[in-house]
Image: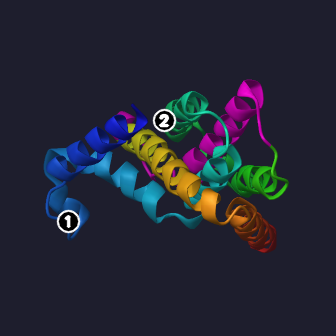
Amino acid sequence: MRRVVTACLASLGAMLAPEVSAHANLGDLAPFWAGAFHVALTPLALAAVVGLAAATVITSEALQLEVALLCAAAAFAVAGLAPPRLDPAAPLGAAVTGLAAVLAWTPQRPGAWTLACIAATTVGLAARPESPNVWEALGSGATSGVLVLWLQEGLRRLERRAPLVRRVLGAWVTALALLLAALALVT
């Protein structure tokens, strides 16, 4: 079921994607794709998504789908509603998801939902467009959910061959988040 949903979302995205050379060429879907690109191209947002996927990769498939949907919905809400002054707090959420993966914690439903909300808050704050609107927030949320699903599927396959891969990714996420938090304090 998860593979069908992921394949359908990827196909829909590929069919709707116009030729991309600048924001102006995106046509009527420009706000949606701007939100999506902000998530896909922001290192801290990607780190939070990778950390969430690594922390929840060994949970059940049903819980993984719940986590991805909750992450998408929460990222949509945060990207559309959060004030920009909270941006320095964004690295902390990525650090929490990374630490959960490093410690090889296997979250149950409440813990997995909490991690999804923490990661989504980081995504929404880190990849928040300059002038957010509903479509940009929707693009951020949709991209977050799809990336979590794709990463969970890929990590599940890697986890069978290399059981330490989630801990290594968690360490990378934690290190990146702490570095960005330190840079935010200095500037």
Image quarter hosting the C terminus: bottom right
Q: Is residue 94 left or right of residue 53?
A: right
Could you say which quadrant of the image residue 61 lies in? top right
From the top left corner, tell me how far across and down residue 112 is, in percent: 70, 34
Image quarter hosting the N terminus: top left
**Which range of residues does the magenta coloring cover?**
106-135
Q: Earlier in the sequence, mark 2 or mark 1?
A: 1
1 and 44: which one is in front?
1
Q: Residue 95 carries which label?
A: none
153 and 50: which one is in front?
153
Q: Is mark 2 on a helix, strand or loop?
A: helix
The structure residue drawn at horizontal position 57% and vertical position 35%, both measured from the top left corner, is: 64
The kind of residue on which mark 2 rests is: Phe
From the top left corner, tell me how far across and down residue 19 is, in percent: 14, 64
Could you say which quadrant of the image residue 158 lies in? bottom right
Q: In this view, does 48 lie to the left or right of 20?
A: right
Q: Which mark is residue 76?
A: 2
Q: Which colour scheme is used?
A: rainbow
The structure residue drawn at horizontal position 25% and vertical position 61%, both measured from the top left corner, is: 23
The structure residue drawn at horizontal position 75% and vertical position 73%, both measured from the top left corner, is: 183
* Chief SS of the magenta region: helix
From the top left corner, tell me how far across and down residue 113 is, in percent: 68, 30
Q: CA separation, marks 2 and 1? A: 23 Å
Q: Name the residue under label 1.
A: 20
Q: Is mark 1 on a helix, strand or loop?
A: loop
In the image, is residue 115 part of the stretch drawn in magenta? yes
Q: In this view, does 42 lie to the left or right of 121?
A: left
Q: In this view, does 35 lie to the left or right of 24?
A: right
Image: 166 above or below 75: below
